[in-house]
Image: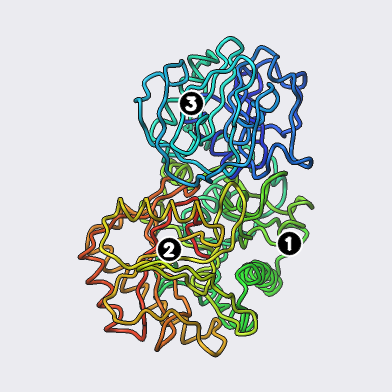
Amino acid sequence: MMYCFLAFMHHIAILDFGSQYTHLIARRIRELGVRSEIYPANTTSGSLPADAIGIILSGGPQSVYDERSVQIDPALFSCGRPVLGLCYGHQLMAQYTNGAVEPGTVREYGRAELMREDNVLMRSVPEKSTVWMSHGDAVTKLGDGFKKIGATADCPIAAMANDEKKLYGLQFHPEVKHSEYGMTMLNNFVFAVCGAEKNWNIEHLIDLLIADIRQKAADKKVFVLVSGGVDSSVTFALLSRALGSNRVYGLYVNTGFMRKDESEEIEAHFKSAGFENIHTFDAHEIFYERLSNVCDPEEKRKIIGATFIDVKDGVAERSGLNGDEWMLGQGTIYPDTIETGGTQHADTIKTHHNRVDAIQRMIKEGKVIEPIAEFYKDEVRELGRLLGLPERMISRHPFPGPGLAIRILCHDTEKSATAPVRKEKNAAVLPIRSVGVQGDNRTYAHPLVVWNNDGWSELDAFSSKTTNNSKDINRVVLLLNETNERTFSLPLKTKSLTLDRIRLLQDVDALVMREIVDAGYETMLWQCPVVLAPIGYDHFESIILRPVVSQEAMTAHFARLDRQFLARLAQTIVDTYPIDYILYDITNKPPGTIEWE
C-alpha cells in the first residue's frame, strides 16, 4: 500500500480474509485519525512490526470449519496485542480458543437489532441499536475466558469479549455506515483498548499521491480513459498535476450506452474545467456490434472491458503514440477491485470493465497506473475538492463504466431461467435473475415481486426476512403501477441489446431523473439506477427503479421515497412508453448489489 513510508508511526494491523469490507475497515480507522495497514491472512505474530499496536481480523466468504478455509497463526491470540475479530474473524477467534462455530439456523443479511451488555467495547452504545449482518455461520459456544456482550434475535453470540487478554469478537460489521454505532465500537477498540494516538489526516494525501505517481510512472507518459465521472476525473487531474498535461493523454469514449445527451454534457464539463489534453472518440458502432445477441451479464462486462482496450489501442496507433513510452491510467477505486475478487481470498461478485483479463495482464506487466485504487467514492470526492475540481463533476451520481449495457437485462430463449414456484398471497417469483452479495459470496438468483400497501418499514422487514430464508431469492421488488395483470412472463423471442431497447431505456431514464431532480431527491440519493427487464404480458418490457442511499457503496439501503410521488411517476411512464410494469427495488446491500448485473 502507498502508506508504507509511514512505517515509523504506530498503526492498526488488519488481516485480510477476503471480505468485501476489508479496505473499508482500513478506511474507517483512517477516519478516526489513525494509520492502518492491511496484511495477508497468513501473517504471523512474529512478522508483524512492533508499531502494530492492535490487530483486526476481517470477514471472509468461507466457513472456518471447512478443511480448505483460510486459517490463522494461533499466536496472534496470545501475543499481548489487542485483537478484534469481525464476522469470519469473530468465528476464527472462537474456533481457536476452544469455542464452536456451526451453520446458523437462520442466515442474517442486512439489518438486525443488537442488544448489548456492558463492556469497554460497548461504551456509549445504547442497549439496543441497529447493526449490519452478512453471515450464514454463527458462534454457538464461547471460547475459553470469553463472555457474551451482545446478541440479536437470530444470533445469540453476536458479540463476545475476553477482557483479560484484550480479545473481542463481533459477528456483525461495525465498519459499515448502516451499523449505527459501529464507529463508536471501533473508536473504543482503537483508543480505549489499543491506546492509539491520532496520526493520520486526508489533507496530506495530495502530495503523497503525486509523489507516488511520479515514482511509478518514472519517465513514461500516461493514456487515461475518462468517463466524466468523479473517479476518472480525479485520476486525470492527479496525473496531469503530477506529470504535466504534455505527458497525459485523456480519452473519452462514447460507447453508445450513456444516458440521453450525456456525452455532449461530459465534453462541455471538461472544457469548462480547463482540461486541454482531453480527446473524444465515438465508438458506439464497435460496442453495438460486439455485444449483439450477448445476454449473459458477466460476458457483457468482459466484452465491454476488452473493447475499451481495443479502442484505446486503435486511437493511440492512429495518433502516432509509441506504445513503449506509455502506461494506461485508470480511475479504479477499491469497490471495483474487491467485487472482481481482487484480493487473495475474495469471491468474484461481478467483473468490472477495468478488471478484465487484458487489464489484469497489463497490471502484472507494470503497464497500468491507478492512483486512487485504495479509496472509496466519498474519499475520491474529497480528493476532487482538494484538487479544486468543479462541484458538478465531483457530486455527479455514480454511473457504471459499461453504462446502460448492464442496466438492460437480456433474455436468451435457449438459456432462460425457470423461476421457483412460491405459493404466497400478493407475491410472485420473477423468471429473471440478478447479481447479489451474501456472506461475501456472489449470488445469482431470482427477485420476488410483491404488491400491497404496507409501509416502508414493514416492506423492509419482509424483504430482509425473505432473502434471509430463501436461497432462491436475493431481491424483493414492489409493484408500483395499478394494473389488473399479474402475469410476469418472458417473451417468446430473445431480447438483447438492440438499438430500440437502448433508446427506450435512455428515454425512461431521462424522465425518471428529471422527476427525481424536480422533487428534490437528487442530493439525498447515492444514485438511482433505472433497469429495463424483459418481462411482462403485452410489451414484455418492465422498468425497475433502484434508488439507494449510501456513503461508499459497500453497503446501501433502498430509498424510502414518497409513495404518491412514485405512483405518479409509474403512471407517467406506462402512459408514455411501451412498458408493462414499474417495479421498485426494496432490497438493501447486502443481499442485493446496487446494480442488477
Using a 10 Å C-alpha cutoff, classify the residue at mark 2 as few (fewer than 14 neighbours), some (14 to 19) or many (20 or more).
Answer: few
Gap between marks 3 and 1 measured at Cα:
37 Å
Q: Quadrant of residue 566?
A: bottom left
Q: Amino acid at mark 3?
A: Leu
Gap between marks 2 and 1 measured at Cα:
33 Å
Q: Which residue is mark 2?
A: 271
Q: Nearer the viewer, residue 42 or 214?
A: 42
* Quadrant of the drawing holding the N terminus: top right
Gap between marks 2 and 3 measured at Cα:
44 Å
Q: Is residue 247 visible?
A: no
Query: Which residue is farthest front?
Result: 423
Q: Nearer the viewer, residue 213 or 183?
A: 183
Per the image, label 3 sits on a secondary structure element best described as helix
Q: Which residue is mark 1?
A: 357
Q: Position of residue 84 (x, y in %)?
A: 58, 24
Q: Which residue is mark 3?
A: 186
- State which tag comes first along the sequence, 3 or 1: 3
Q: Is residue 588 visible?
A: yes
- Residue 548 located left or right of residue 491: left
Per the image, label 2 sits on a secondary structure element best described as helix
Q: Amino acid at mark 2?
A: Lys
